[in-house]
Amino acid sequence: MAALGWLTPRRRSATARSVLAGEAAAEAARKTSAQLEQEREEAAAAAAAEAAAAEPEFPVVGDTRAAAFFDLDNTVMQGAAIFHFGRGLYKRKFFQRRELARFAWAQVWFRLAGVEDPEHMQDARDSALSIVKGHRVSELMSIGEEIYDEYMADRIWPGTRALAQAHLDAGQKVWLVTAAPVETATIIARRLGLTGALGTVAESVDGVYTGRLVGELLHGPAKAEAVRALAAAEGLDLARCAAYSDSHNDIPMLSLVGHPYAINPDTKLRKHARARDWRLRDYRTGRKAAKVGIPAAAGVGALAGGTAAALALHRRRR
């Protein structure tokens, strides 16, 4: 067995040189470890600084002088609220097919043309007012709750809803701003847990609609004026507020705030937003929706028969 003794490690006492080597290795390990940790911390700090510079924290938590203003149609909801409301009223026999055709055509033109043509603006206003004239506000509010469940609840864009919730979570107020009747807008705002709504105000006397408006439709520049007035009353700093819309008609409102967002933008708004480096979000799917800018041009689909009739009627009138 002595011949195999070379296979057995021999115990050797540490020499001064080996002790020095061990201590030097340990010290080098500690230094390199500390250096690597410092490099990691510096890299993380640099990444955080770069991210903060590119996308600052927003909304700012606790900034109660800031609020958010959301357009409704095709921004918060797929399609137009007034279409869905009209469908619900037609289902309940509030008006006949001929009225539905006129109502549908006025609303389709208003949405697709994207211009405030006086004739069609008048049609849009008059058709809506003729439908509710003589009805009690409380009746329309009650029916509006049912219509929301039937036609609107499943059409809320989850992405836009999340943006609104971020403002709420930051302790800020969130308002809908829409040309839809204020009663309809208020129902939607309440169902979504938002602060409230700015909408078109129809005159009522003793709780009954007269068939007249207070002022005009809340559209285009009127939205900006409504936001300006509310901000003054609420003590908001518009430079710290945000606004969200899909339509170039809302550029006056978007330009009013410090944080404008183009949501599911139409072609004109997309171009305007890119030129001014506004933030864009698009929650639509499909090439057609992206190109046209009106997902659910739809809401119109359910009124297709009435719309076709209205188109024919319109051509005859011209």
Image (cartoon, helix red, strand yellow):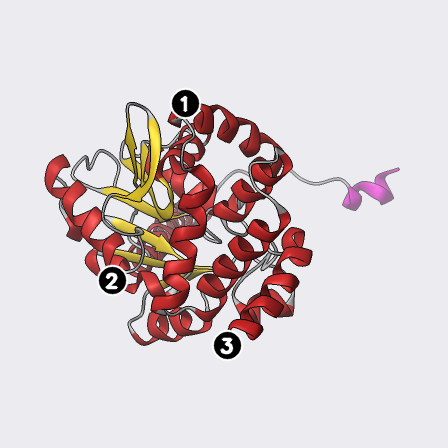
Left/right placement of residue 253 relative to residue 116 reads left
Look at the picture and state if 312 lies above or below 192. Answer: below
Question: Is 32 or 70 nearer to us in this picture?
Answer: 70
Q: CA distance from mark 1 to mark 2?
A: 33 Å
Q: CA distance from mark 3 to mark 1?
A: 39 Å
Q: Is residue 6 part of the magenta span, yes or no?
A: yes
Amino acid type at circle 1 is Ser
| Residue 318 x %, y % | 50, 76
- Between disc 3 and disc 1, the foreground one is 3
| Residue 204 x %, y % | 30, 32
| Residue 146 numbered mark, or none | none
Residue 210: image quadrant is: top left
| Residue 252 numbered mark, or none | 2
Q: Is residue 301 part of the magenta span, yes or no?
A: no
Q: Which residue is mark 1?
A: 138
| Residue 155 x %, y % | 58, 43
> Mark 2 Cα within 10 Å, few/some/many (few <14, many 20+)?
some
Amino acid type at circle 3 is Arg
The span picked out in magenta is: 1-7
| Mark 3, secondary structure of its residue | loop
